[in-house]
Structure formats: C-alpha cells, structure tokens
C-alpha cells in the first residue's frame, strides 16, 4: 500500500513538473510571483514585471475576449537607424522599458526590448485602450449606431437615467468634461479608480454602470475637465450597447483585421463580462506600431475611412484645457499644439503620433516610480522631442 501511495505521488509530481515546463515563460513568471490580490495599483514591481506581459494568461486573474490577428499582416519594413543624440540604453533603463519602437515614414527606425520581453509577447496597454475605445465611437457614428455626439449618454445607456450622467452628452463623456465627481488618485486605495473594480453590482446591472450612476455632480456639464477612467469605461459600455457587439469583436472588425495586425490581441473583461473600455488591451509592440500607423494614415480601409469626415481633426486636437501650456485633451487623446497627439497608459505605456513627421513612437514599460512617475514622464517627453529633432536634422541635411 505504501509503495502504491508513493508511486501515485511521484506520478502526480512528475505530471505537475511536466505541466510547469509546458507553460510559456510569461505564464511561469507570473505564477512564480503570483499577486496576492487583484488590485494592480498596489502590486510590487516584480509582480508587475511578470504580470504586464501575462495578464491574459490566467483566467483566475483576469478573463479576456480575444481580438483575432489579420490573415494578411501589414509590412513593417526596416529603415535606416535613426541618428539620435540620446543614450538609448540609459533612457530605457530609466524608463524600465519593455519595448521601444520608432516608426518613421512607415519604416522601423528603432526597435529595442528590455525586462526580458521581446517582439513575440503581448504587453498590457492600460489607458492606451482609451484612444482605441474613442476610435470605436467614431466608427459607430460612421456605421449609424450612434446618431450624434450631442446625444445624451442615457439615450444609449438607459440605466443612467436619473443619475448625474442624465444631462451629459456623448461629446462631454469623450472629453471628460461631464462635471461628475471622480477621484483618479492611483496611490489612494479609497479612490474611485481603486474601488470601482471591486464594486458589487445590483442584480441585472452592468458592474461599471452600477458604480457610476451613484456618483454625485461636482460641476455643470462641459465646464470642467477631470481625468476619469470610469468615464471611458462608460464610453465602452455605450459603444457595446449602441452596436450590440462586444468591444473585442468591433475592434477586430473595424481596426485589428483591416490594419493588418500580425498577432492576436486580448481585451480584459469586467466582473459582469464586458470589456473594460478604459483599460487593458494586450498586444504585441509591433502591432501597437501598426495601430499608430493606421491612425496616422486616417484609419483608411480600401480608400474609405472607418470614421466620419473631420473626426481626426476633432479627436486629436484640443477639446479641453488640462492646465498645461501647449497641451490639451481631445476625444480620449492627449494633444500637443504642434499637431502631435498621444495615447497614454499608467506605468509608462504610450503611442505618440506626429503627423508632420510621419512619426509613431511606441513605449511599453513598468516605471519604477509607479503608475504616475513625474521624472519618467518628463524623460519620455524629452525623448519624443529628441526623436523629432533627429528627424528634422536628417531632413535638413544636404543630400549626399
């Protein structure tokens, strides 16, 4: 009997060991540093290093919908190295960078990886997803699912009737000027951004809507800008309810497949099974670059834009003042007065787009200073400027 028990245990142990080594390195890394809670904002740096490349691998941690790859990936040809007056190694170390890509005039001018990450992996985007969700609003208007940005939000999300959002327009939701109270302090466990994912929804109500409809009004609609992930999540719910499609399915239809993405992406789901509009698309770094190029080129499919005429002129230029000279906020895009714009996520994720220079810069990272790291933020802005200057100098140089 003892021999049978020990033999059985040996077989179970061998099977477990074999199962461990059958997992990819990202999943093994996540299991080895498994977080003890679901609140990403308060994980340790090693936990984040492991999780950001594998959030979609373990259903107990996060459930996802898949965005399929395109059958015909769009090319990303190699270009000449960009002559940068920057120590790229030092910059990436300061950013704790997992990926850094510079695409200019459709060609890869720089592609570097760190933190043990590579081009085959997926990295979570955090609030970079906000700009994707905004683009799906434009597509839904073009497709006739949303009539007007001046419609009230409650037209598309009836459960918000009677709440502070009843008087808020779709445009005000897109520009984060609803006037509804919200706390986005990532260091405060009692902030709205920390609490809403753990909110227990009422029966039959989407989890986010259940939380957001309880919030009080702090200012008249359209009079104040306040950054709110909750509001982009509402934008995502609005798109889902207007189109009667999941965000993942609509993203695949309007962007991921037409743009020629090489790898599948995933989109994390809320407790009630809907994609979280303000966060958490996981994708490969090169596909983030293809996304930037798709937007840069007007989101054209077979010569026709997926969004209405004039959409990009409104979406990527200042619609709201944010208190910084030369900067603003559009339709879920951070804007610069020189015509550049960016999608940004906490911990150092970003897609910077400069139409004048035909430039896309992709950043994946895990900032040492946390979700919002002022020093790393300024260093990234300085890197953007250095790349722009390098392109300008290259253009100004006499032909050889």
Image: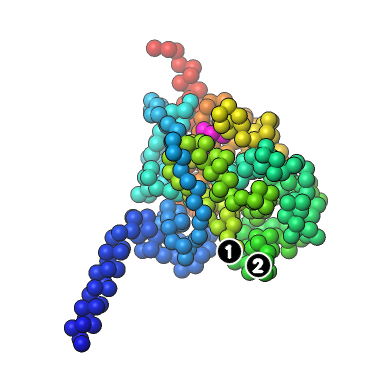
Please state which of residues 313 and 266 is positioned toward the viewer in this rendering. Answer: 266
The disc at residue 65 is none
Q: In the rendered structure, which disc, 2 or 1, sits on the residue that comes first in sequence?
A: 2
Q: Do the residues labelled 2 and 1 touch (CB within 8 Å)?
A: yes
User: Which residue lies at the image location 33% right of the left edge and 58% below the top edge?
Assistant: 23
Identify the element where label 2 is drawn: loop
Please state which of residues 228 and 309 is positioned toward the viewer in this rendering. Answer: 309
Can residue 324 be seen in the rendering of this structure?
Answer: no
What percent of the width, then of the height, locates residue 227?
66, 50
Please state which of residues 222 and 158 is positioned toward the viewer in this rendering. Answer: 158
Res. 75 image quadrant: top left
Q: Decide whether residue 294 is among the magenta residues.
A: yes
Could you tell me what secondary structure mostly forms the magenta stretch? helix
Mark-to-mark CA distance, 2 and 1: 9 Å
Identify the element where label 1 is drawn: loop
What percent of the width, then of the height, locates residue 57?
43, 58
Packing grade of label 1 (10 A; few <14, some 14-19, many >=20) is: some
User: Which residue lies at the image location 45% right of the left edge and 46% below the top edge?
Assistant: 264
What percent of the width, then of the height, locates residue 41?
53, 59
- For the N terminus, give its image quadrant: bottom left
User: Which residue lies at the image location 20% right of the left edge and 86% below the top edge?
Assistant: 2
Packing grade of label 2 (10 A; few <14, some 14-19, many >=20) is: some
User: Which residue lies at the image location 56% right of the left edge and 29% below the top edge?
Assistant: 302
The disc at residue 201 is 2
The disc at residue 271 is 1
Q: Height in image: 118 above or below 258?
A: below
Q: Decide whether residue 287 is among the magenta residues.
A: no
Q: Height in image: 300 above or below 52?
A: above
Write the start and end of the magenta stretch as one range.
Answer: 291-295
Please state which of residues 235 and 220 is positioned toward the viewer in this rendering. Answer: 235
């Amino acid at each position: 009997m003892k021999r049978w028990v020990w033999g059985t245990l040996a077989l179970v142990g061998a099977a477990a060991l074999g199962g461990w080594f059958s997992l990819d390195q990202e999943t093994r890394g996540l299991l080895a540093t498994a977080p003890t809670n679901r609140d990403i904002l308060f994980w340790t740096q090693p936990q984040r290093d492991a999780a950001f490349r594998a959030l979609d691998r373990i259903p107990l941690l996060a459930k996802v919908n898949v965005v399929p790859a395109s059958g015909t990936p769009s090319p990303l040809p190699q270009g000449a190295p960009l002559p940068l007056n920057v120590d790229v190694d030092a910059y990436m170390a300061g950013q704790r960078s997992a990926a850094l890509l510079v695409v200019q005039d459709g060609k890869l001018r720089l592609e570097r990886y760190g933190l043990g990450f590579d081009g085959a992996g997926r990295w979570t985007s955090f609030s970079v997803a906000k700009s994707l969700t905004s683009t799906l609003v434009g597509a839904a208007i073009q497709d006739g699912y949303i009539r007007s940005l001046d419609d009230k939000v409650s037209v598309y999300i009836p459960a918000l009737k009677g709440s502070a959002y009843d008087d808020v327009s779709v445009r005000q939701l897109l520009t984060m000027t609803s006037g509804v109270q919200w706390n986005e302090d990532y260091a405060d466990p009692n902030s709205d951004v920390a609490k809403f994912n753990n909110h227990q929804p009422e029966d039959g109500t989407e989890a986010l809507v259940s939380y957001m409809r309880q919030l009080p009004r702090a200012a008249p609609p359209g009079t104040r800008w306040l950054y709110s992930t909750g509001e982009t999540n509402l934008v995502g719910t609005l798109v889902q309810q207007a189109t009667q499609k999941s965000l993942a399915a609509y993203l695949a239809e309007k962007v991921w497949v037409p743009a020629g993405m090489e790898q599948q992406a995933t989109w994390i789901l809320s407790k009630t099974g809907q994609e979280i509009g303000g966060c958490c698309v996981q994708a490969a770094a090169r596909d983030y670059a293809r996304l930037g190029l798709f937007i840069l080129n007007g989101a054209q499919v077979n010569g026709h834009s997926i969004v209405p005429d004039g959409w990009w002129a409104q979406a990527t230029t200042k619609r709201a003042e944010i208190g910084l000279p030369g900067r603003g906020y559009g339709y879920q895009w951070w804007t610069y007065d020189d015509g550049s714009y960016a999608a940004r996520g906490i911990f150092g994720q970003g897609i910077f787009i400069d139409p004048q220079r035909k430039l896309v810069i992709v950043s994946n990272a895990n900032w040492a200073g946390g979700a919002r790291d002022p020093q790393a933020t300024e260093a990234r802005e300085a890197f953007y400027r250095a790349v722009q200057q390098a392109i300008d100098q290259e253009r100004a140089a006499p032909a050889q």
